[in-house]
Amino acid sequence: MTPALPASAGCTDIPVLRERGQREVFCGLTGIIWLHRKIQDAFFLVVGSRTCAHLLQSAAGVMVFAEPRFGTAIIEERDLAGMADCNEELDRVVDRLLARRPDIRLLFLVGSCPSEVIKLDLSRAAARLSVKHAGATRIVNYSGSGIETTFTEGEDACLAALVPDLAPTDQPGLLIVGTLPDVVEDQFARLFADLGIARVASFPARRADAMPAVGSNTRFLLAQPFLGETARALENRGARRIDALFPFGAEGTTQWLHAAAQAFGIDEMHFRRVIAPGRERAKRAIDHRRAALAGKRVTFLPDSQLEIPLARFLANECGMIPVEVGTPYLHRRHLAQELALLSPDTLISEGQDVDRQLDRVRASRPDLTVCGLGLANPLEAEGLTTKWAIELVFSPIHGFDQAGDLAELFTRPLRRRDVLRV
Amino acid sequence: MQLTVWTYEGPPHVGAMRIATAMTGVHYVLHAPQGDTYADLLFTMIERRGKRPPVTYTTFQARDLGKDTAELLQQAARDAYTRFVPAAMLVGASCTAELIQDDPAGLVEAMDLPCPVVALELPSYSRRENWGAAETFYHLVRKLCADPAPRQPGGRPRANLLGPTALGFRHRDDVTEITRLLRQLGIDVHVTAPLGASPADLARLGEADFNICLYPEIADTACRWLERRYGQKTVRTVPIGHGATRQFIAEVADIAGVDASALVDSSNLPWWSRSVDSTYLTGKRVFIFGDATHAIAAARVARDELGFEVVGLGCYNREFARDLREAAALYGVEPLITDDYLEVETAIAAVQPELVLGTQMERHIAKRLRIPCAVISAPVHVQDFPARYSPQMGFEGANVLFDTWVHPLVMGLEEHLLTMFRDDFEFSDAAGASHLGHGAVAAPAAAEPVAVAAVPDVGGWSAEAEKELLKIPFFVRGKARRNTERYAAELGIAAITLDTLYDAKAHYAR
């Protein structure tokens, strides 16, 4: 059912263009936008500047929530005068916040570029405040700063920060790691239950007090390709990663589920029987979109680290031709199987020098360029069709029943280009 | 430390970006970590610009700190010059770069680039976007403005239009409107800046006879300097509203020495406001919040030109707090000067106005409180950049204000009918105004003035249902009857009962 894959060692030979220069990407703070929707009793307090607050507001697009479960403690001039003052100020802000929001069970103090540069020790602050608010609210810290994290790495840092506090367990179990929309999470849970894998949990859980336990008999599957630190933290707790493709498209999802089934000794015939309906549905849904995508050339500019698995999906299941696949950071080990499935003609680039990369886009003129919001309209104005990368992060795209939607996200800009007569 | 949920203004370097993006031939090298590039999307998405803002970010990372961030900055400046060949360059730091104290100004000046370089010091931890824009514009003007050649006698008076920027609330259309107005007065616009201006245009500012400070938040500092340096007078009336436009014309005519008496007052606002349908506007309680200039202007229009009652007035930019306090005194309200969104929400909830004139933030507040709202000021969102011509200033601007502020309210005739059908099943007060969206119950098809149609076959109606039909307002009764009969026919229902009527209503309500 799944093709034999070359050993991961071979993939390190794949040539990668490494660039550094101006990066047109979000920082790790942006992950708060989906993380706070997932963990429903958590609050994310960025300790940063007005820029951080403005970024969250602009990236979130609209202010749907009157009092969202995130906010910024804006460092002001007088805070910069002395560190003792800064800690007292932070305590005051946290006290006020928790008094106003007694429903909050988990508070993240999120480090930013300014807090990192002034070396404000948020781990000590978290420890101090955890004692003060013991019994009511747990306080954890991580950094979403732009000097350390790129976009989705913020989620990685957030989850990694939670791992040390997960309860220990000796029982065998499967952990699905990475924030997924609830609907997708539930679909996967049903599939794993039908496969007969007992004790399957998602990390992060929807509530702070429902976080899964972890131990040396825990096996985990990454649902997202950007969770390097989280995987390492789980491995430090004895858990073992199941190497797999990422669950995008019919093939990716099949192989992802199959890797878990094998790890748990599920009978091959039973596996095929359980996944057959979903797999067939996914293939049918993708087939509807295939004609619009087949033979079209696509370039990914670096954004979320989803680029390589998505390029694999578009190439192998939709017949697209990836020209350049840029990623902010390439985790070679976690992506080894994915990389092996990409054509050697595809240029893989890591990091970014945006002006040079745009020169390459203008030279190769792909049919579709997947890029960030800052670049989309300027490229459209140059006659290049674009897809907003951020939609791939905010929309449910994993699993069998979203495979058609995923393909549809790429066909829409092409279809629009074809129907417009203005 | 200040706990912030939503912020009215960005950091000051975003203000500098608004100046650089508005102009041509200017490039801004910003010492900043990755992530700060988010600001590009403000211009490309919200304003739908087809070009990237002319900004190069140095994108330093943690591992660069204490090592070679200075070299990174010089490299970025060199590359940016080579690639974009700007006529002038801005150099500055974002909040994080300010902390590492690389001295971008000194570093880039030492490079001796073949174009004028303006070094910006915009303190991120005490100042904000509008201030940053004003400071950037002032420093550009100071650096680039050349002493004017002696003016030949004769010729039309010349004015500079100062203040419009990128990402400004209706700046594009205000410039068009005011330029047209000045032309009618026999005055030439010498330079409009920063919007659309090049560094060479800024060099010519001194040649104008006077300046028009269109947006004081952006242009006041530069206007004051030009006043001192070249003795140019400044027109300070902001022409938002009918009265303010007339006052603006008088002030311009006085400074330029032209006769404005022949100018045709083309505004519809006075008659639209005096016509009887507007009677219902009288005493509507309105809460106003925005940048000081727009908020103060809106209060005047609201009270004097629409007959509203101003029940709240505030601004988020403290730099103009004094002006706002003076205005608030005129209306006998407590001035609200804050950039705390929750405080504004509390204030609005407390006075329960019938209309909110505010920013995109107040639009969200009003939506939650189910109060009609119109946007009068930045911060902006994509819908504040309409495809159509829609100025806020001048006579056409006054027309736009009338339409956009009155539109969210229920129309006079509608209000009359609402009273008449207060207990009617569709026109109950609980139904609310239809524009408030999903919360409203059964939006009636009120827009269609359908006369009572002759119904050929009434045999199917029960007496009870027929009686209920008569309670429906006349102008939708015919439609209700037709819909009910079609529904009954489709379902093969022979006798139309009370239930059929309401089932049909529910069926067609989707």
Image: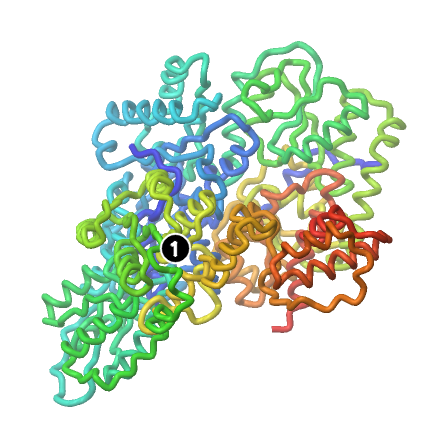
User: Which chain does the residue under circle 1 lie in?
Assistant: B
Residue A53 position within the rendered picture, expressed as x and y whole percent measured from the top left: 39, 41
Picture layout, residue A397 above or below residue B410 = above
Q: Hey, which quadrant is residue B255 in on the image? A: bottom left
Residue B397 showing in the rendered view: no
Q: Determine whether, in the image, residue A273 is placed left or right of residue B8.
A: right
Picture layout, residue B19 above or below residue B493 = below
Going 34% across and 40% down the picture, which residue do you hit?
A: B350
Going 71% across and 32% down the picture, which residue do you hit?
A: A244
Going 68% across and 21% down the picture, which residue do you hit?
A: A219
The residue wearing badge 1 is B56
Mark 1 belongs to which amino acid?
Thr
Residue B79 position within the rendered picture, expressed as x and y whole percent measured from the top left: 38, 58
Seen from the viewer's position, the closer of residues B249 and B473 is B473
Q: Residue furthest bottom?
A: B154
How packed is label 1: few (under 14 Cα within 10 Å), some, or many (20 or more)? many
Residue A358 position within the rendered picture, expressed as x and y whole percent measured from the top left: 52, 59
Q: Determine whether, in the image, residue A418 is placed left or right of residue B266.
A: right
The quadrant of the picture occupied by the C terminus of chain A is: bottom right
Label 1 residue SS:
strand
